[in-house]
Image (cartoon, rainbow, N blue to C red):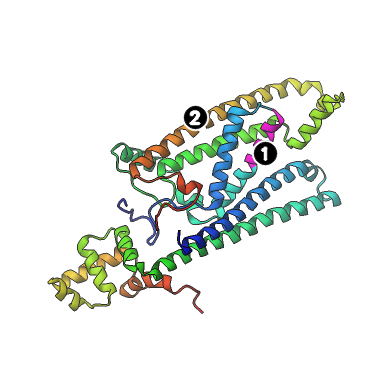
Amino acid sequence: MNFTSLRFRRGRHETTALATFMALQSIAAVFFVGDVFADLVGDLGSPHSLQEAFVVFVLVLGIFLAGWQLRLTLQRMRDQERALDTARGELSRIVENQFEEWGLTPAERDVGLLALKGLDLAEIAEMRGAAQGTVRAQLTRIYAKAGVSGRHQFAAWFVEDLLVGKLA
Amino acid sequence: MATPKSRHETGRAHSPPDPWDPVVRISHWTLAAAVIANGLLTKPGGTIHIWIGWVALGLLALRFFWGLFGPAEARFSSFLPDPRAAVAHLLQLARGKPSEYPSHNPAASIMVYALWACLVAVTATGLVMTGGKSPVTIAEEKAAVAAGDWSVLVDQDDSEHASEDNDAGEIMEEIHETAANLLLILALLHVAGVAVESRLLRRNLVRPMIYGRARNK
C-alpha cells in the first residue's frame, strides 16, 4: 500500500460519500414529493403548495448539483490517475497496452514505437530493413487504428496526459 | 485483453470500469438488498415492506438520473439494448471466448433493462396498491385503527365503483407478485451470468462493483 494508492483511496471515499449523500437526497425527494403530491395536484397556486413546490425544486436541484460535482470529481480522479501513471515512468507500459488495445500487429507495434521516439520514415525503414512504402503503409494503418489524423496527434495522444490543465 | 472492437471510440479501455462509479455501486447494492428483503423476508404489505419499496423507488430514480447525466459507462447510451449483439455475446460465451466491453456487455445490458422493467412494475403497482400513501401515513393510519379510530378504513368512493376498484386492485396485486417473482428469478440468472463471465474472463467482476481496483499496482 503506497502513498499514491492511499491518496486515491481517499478520493474514492470522498466520491462515495458524495454518492451516498445523493442517494439520501433522492430518497428524501421521493418521500417529500409523495407526501405533498396530492396537495400539489389538488390546489396548485395556493401559497402552501407553492412553498412545497419550491422545496421540491430545491431538493431536486440539489441532486443535480451533487451529481454534477460528482461527475467532475470522477473525471478529475481519472485524469490524475492517468497522468500519474505516465509520470511514474510507466509510459512504455501505457504505450504497450494502448497498442494492444488498438489491435496493432507486432510489426506495427515496432514501427509505432519508433515513430513515437521521433524517427522519420527513412530512418524507420532503414532500421527495420524494409521499403519506405511498406513503413508508410504501416504508419497509415497505425493512425487509422488509433483514430488519429497523423503523426502529431499520434504522439500527442500519449503526451497530453502529462499536460494536465486546460488550454489557455 | 480481448481484441478491441473498432466501433468503440479510441482511447477508452475495453473492459468494464474498475471500479464502477459510486452512484452505480450504491444504487446496485441498495436495490439488490431491497429486492432480497422485500422478495423474501418482509411481510408483504407491511410497513417495513412499504418503507423499503419507497427507498428502492428513490434509488431507482437516482440511477435513471445517472443514466442520463452520469459518466459515460453509467449512461444508457453506452449500453442500449441490442438483442442481436446479446445473442452473439452468449454464443461467444458458449465458445468460451467473450469479448470485453467498456460498460455492460450486450447480454448483461438486456439483463439490466429487464431488471429495471421489473423494478418499475413492482414499485409502480406497489404505489397503486397503497394509494400512493407514504409509509409514514400508512403507519399513522394503522396506529389510528389499532387505537380504535376506524374512520380511515371508510372508502371515500361510493359503493358503485367499489367492485371495479376491487378488480383493478386484484389485477395490480397479480402484476405486483408476478413482477416480483420474475425479479427474483432474473436476479438469480444475473448472478449466474456474472459468475460465468468472471470465470471465462479470469477476472473478478464483483469486486469493481464493491470497491477498489483489480489492477494490482
Q: Nearer the viewer, residue A91 or A1?
A: A1
The span from disc 2 to disc 1 (Cα, nearest Å) is: 22 Å
Locate residue B127: give its quadrant: top right
Q: Are marks 2 and 1 on the same chain?
A: yes
Task: Spot the residue most to the bottom.
Answer: A168
* Three-letter residue code for mark 1: Trp
What is the magenta range? B46-57
Query: Where's the N terminus of chain A, which quadrant?
Result: bottom left
- The percent position of residue B156, horizontal first and vertical second, equals 82, 28
Residue at image x 73%, y 32%?
A: B131
Mark sitting on residue B120:
none
| Residue annotated with mark 1 | B54
Locate residue B40: give its quadrant: top right
Q: Is residue B54 magenta?
A: yes
Q: Is residue A45 left or right of residue B34?
A: right
Mark sitting on residue B185:
2
Q: Is residue A38 magenta?
A: no
Q: In terms of secondary structure, where does tag 1 sit?
A: helix
Residue at image x 32%, y 52%?
A: B1
* Three-letter residue code for mark 2: Ile
Residue at mark 2: chain:
B
Locate residue A131: give its quadrant: bottom left
